[in-house]
């Protein structure tokens, strides 16, 4: 696939970069309001937004919510060890590197061609301690040492759906193995009415972690529209008050559910196992219009 580009390093005349990758057609679209910022789309579905001049800027709603989790996972500025399953344009790894210097991070992204595209067009800070591995997310996670990570962030979509093998209790067993006792698991989930996938994911996480929270747009929680929800889990109590405050003060406010209300939200859904796991539902075409 050919590509169109004019001085991607910051010219007002910057043009989109279009290239075939393993997962479909990738497009890097310049942000008209930020001179060195880009949005990554795969087959027309927005995946990531990156500002090379300001990597602490998070444009997408779900990425800001994951950013809140990252901010609260350790004291401000303290380096962390993070695993990112799903790379996209490396937005959240860049965010960690910018807000928590000297952090050590691993990105696992199956799409090797996408990794090459992002590395070339949106290069990482050479001083950032970020290792990128082209592998399946679960296979890559299996190579991370026991108790290594302060954070495991899961943001994996294939054809706009989370693969089935990343939705099970057995997968979360691997996440728990990799996390430190104080570590935090955060996952970007997508679902719409009747929210069966989301309810099942909460029940699955509840079977493996004692502390849970869900951050989402109230309309998504009410089953009024398809959208993203961020599931957070840990063995230790979560900073619920501050997470709630930050989510509510976003440009697109979100609600934080936890405790009995979150348990009730599952509606009796059962934990998902490898044997019964299915991919998350495909979003309706109207989502990306």
Image (cartoon, rainbow, N blue to C red):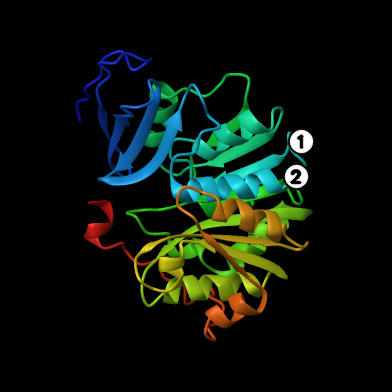
Relative to 275, is 162 above or below?
above
Q: Residues within 10 Å of mark 2 (few under 14, many from 20)?
A: some
Q: Nearer the viewer, residue 193 or 282?
A: 193
In the image, what residue occupies the spot 65% across and 32% down?
99
Identity of the residue furthest to the bottom in this view: 268
Residue displayed at 39% across by 73% down: 223
Q: Name the mark on residue 239.
A: none
Q: Quick check: 3 above or below 232?
A: above
Q: Decide which of 219, 13 is in the foreground and name it.
A: 219
- The mark tally for this picture is 2
* Residue at numbered disc 1: 78
* Residue for point 51% across, 26% down: 54
Q: Dot 1 lies on which element?
A: loop
Q: Position of residue 88 (x, y in %)?
A: 43, 40
Please identify the quarter of the rendering in which residue 117 is found.
top left
Image spot of residue 173 (x, y percent): 66, 64
* Of the pair 30 and 256, the residue shown nearer to us: 256
Residue 204 vs residue 277: left or right? right
- What residue is shown with label 2? 74
């Amino acid at each position: 696939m050919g590509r169109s580009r004019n001085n991607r390093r910051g010219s007002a005349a910057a043009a989109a970069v279009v290239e075939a990758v393993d997962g479909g057609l990738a497009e890097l679209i310049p942000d008209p309001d930020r001179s060195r910022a880009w949005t990554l789309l795969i087959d027309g579905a927005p995946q990531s937004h990156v500002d090379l001049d300001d990597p602490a800027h998070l444009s997408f709603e779900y990425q800001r919510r994951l950013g809140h989790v990252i901010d609260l996972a350790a004291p401000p500025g303290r380096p962390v060890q993070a695993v990112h399953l799903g790379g996209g344009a490396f937005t959240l790894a860049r965010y960690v590197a910018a807000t928590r210097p000297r952090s050590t991070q691993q990105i696992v992204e199956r799409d090797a061609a996408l990794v090459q595209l992002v590395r070339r067009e949106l290069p990482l800070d050479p001083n950032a301690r970020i290792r990128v591995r082209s592998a399946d997310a679960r296979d890559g996670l299996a190579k991370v040492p026991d108790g290594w990570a302060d954070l495991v962030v899961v943001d994996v979509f294939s054809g706009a759906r989370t693969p089935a093998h990343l939705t099970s209790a057995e997968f979360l067993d691997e996440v728990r193995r990799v996390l430190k006792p104080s570590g935090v698991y955060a996952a970007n989930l997508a679902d719409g009415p009747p929210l069966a996938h989301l309810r099942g994911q909460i029940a699955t996480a509840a079977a493996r972690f004692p502390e849970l929270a869900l951050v989402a747009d109230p309309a998504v929680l009410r089953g009024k529209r398809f959208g993203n929800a961020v599931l957070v889990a840990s063995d230790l109590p979560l900073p619920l008050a501050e997470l709630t405050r930050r989510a509510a003060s976003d440009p697109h406010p979100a609600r934080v559910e936890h405790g009995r209300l979150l348990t009730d939200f599952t509606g009796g859904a059962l934990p998902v196992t490898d044997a019964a796991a299915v991919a998350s539902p495909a979003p309706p075409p109207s989502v990306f219009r």
